[in-house]
Amino acid sequence: MFTSCDKTDEMPVEQQEREISNAQMQNSKNPYDKEGELHNAFLDYFIAKADGSKEMNREKMLKIYADFYASQKMEFGEAQINGYEELFNAYSEMNIGGSSSNFPPQFCRWFPVICDILTPSPTFPYLLPLGLLNENNGGTSTDRALKFIDVVKENEVKITASKELSEEQKKALLNQHAIARYSAGYWHNVSAIQQSNSGYYDAFQEAEAAKVCHTCDVVGADAAGAAVGALVGGVGAGPGAGIASGAALLEKAWNWFWN
């Protein structure tokens, strides 16, 4: 007997990218999970309200924040204004939105609680697994982002149960991890699903082509911004982190006021 083989059956099926939903980003066991939702909401609000100028000054930025807080029925008063001024100064020293982020010598004096959290160390058991987002790991962007989100959730269980961490450290880490989950999902959706329908897409594509893993950089900036924002009075970790990743992404498109 002879059998025939349809050559089309032998061709590998191209894996389709899928949108990552809020439900997939969520972790109800993290008490700061809401900050992740606010982070993504702020990114949408920011790109819709920014006027496309090549410059972003503090006055414009504070106006966007005030309007965003109002849209969320959140208070934006003197405490928030002072808090964001402090946050902007910290981002200036960290060079967020510049060619590379750094931790200035005074960083550990400003934020001693999170100095170890944001200083890379192979012995620190709660580091974000940003390398999982690198396309060199294979699979689709969807696969990599969902794997990253799952591992971050596993980390959150360990953080919550830790006897070594202080309550302030837990607060900073849990905010950091919550924003990282939502950030990974958000930027995946921008680059793989929304594409040109997102105001961020062109800048994202340009930066991604020039770097080993720009997604890693943007999610990392988000997470660092969240950890700092969580401890600055009057500032929410989610909105505070949102502008950090926005600056990291749009560094070539705009002249950021803190650079």
Image (cartoon, rainbow, N blue to C red):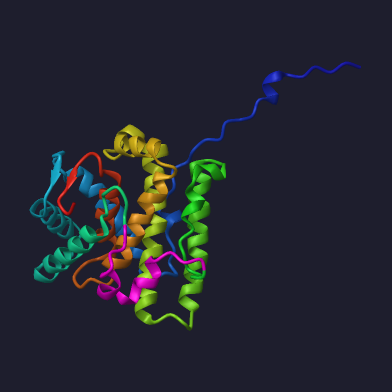
Above/below status of 214 relative to 155: above
Q: Is residue 242 left or right of residue 188?
A: left
At 46% across and 61% down in the image, what residue appears? 128
Position of 56 relative to 221 (above/below):
above
Q: Where, by quadrant of the figure, is residue 75 drawn?
A: bottom left
Residue 238 falls in image quadrant = bottom left
In the rendering, at what x and y percent does residue 14 appear? 57, 31
Task: Kindly identify the residue that appears in the image at 30 percent across and 73 percent down.
Answer: 108
Q: What x and y, as percent, mark residue 103?
A: 31, 63
Q: Residue at x 38, y 50 (%)?
A: 217
What x and y, as percent, mark residue 213?
A: 43, 45
85 lies above or below 218? below
Q: Which of 126/158 is in front?
A: 126
Q: Which residues are magenta?
A: 102-122
Instruction: State whether residue 69 is above or below residue 143.
Output: below
Identify the residue at horizontal 23%, vertical 59% (top origin).
91
- Is residue 109 one of those drawn in magenta? yes
Q: Is residue 244 left or right of residue 21?
A: left
Q: Is residue 242 visible?
A: yes
Q: Is residue 31 visible?
A: no
Indicate whether residue 48 is drawn in magenta.
Answer: no
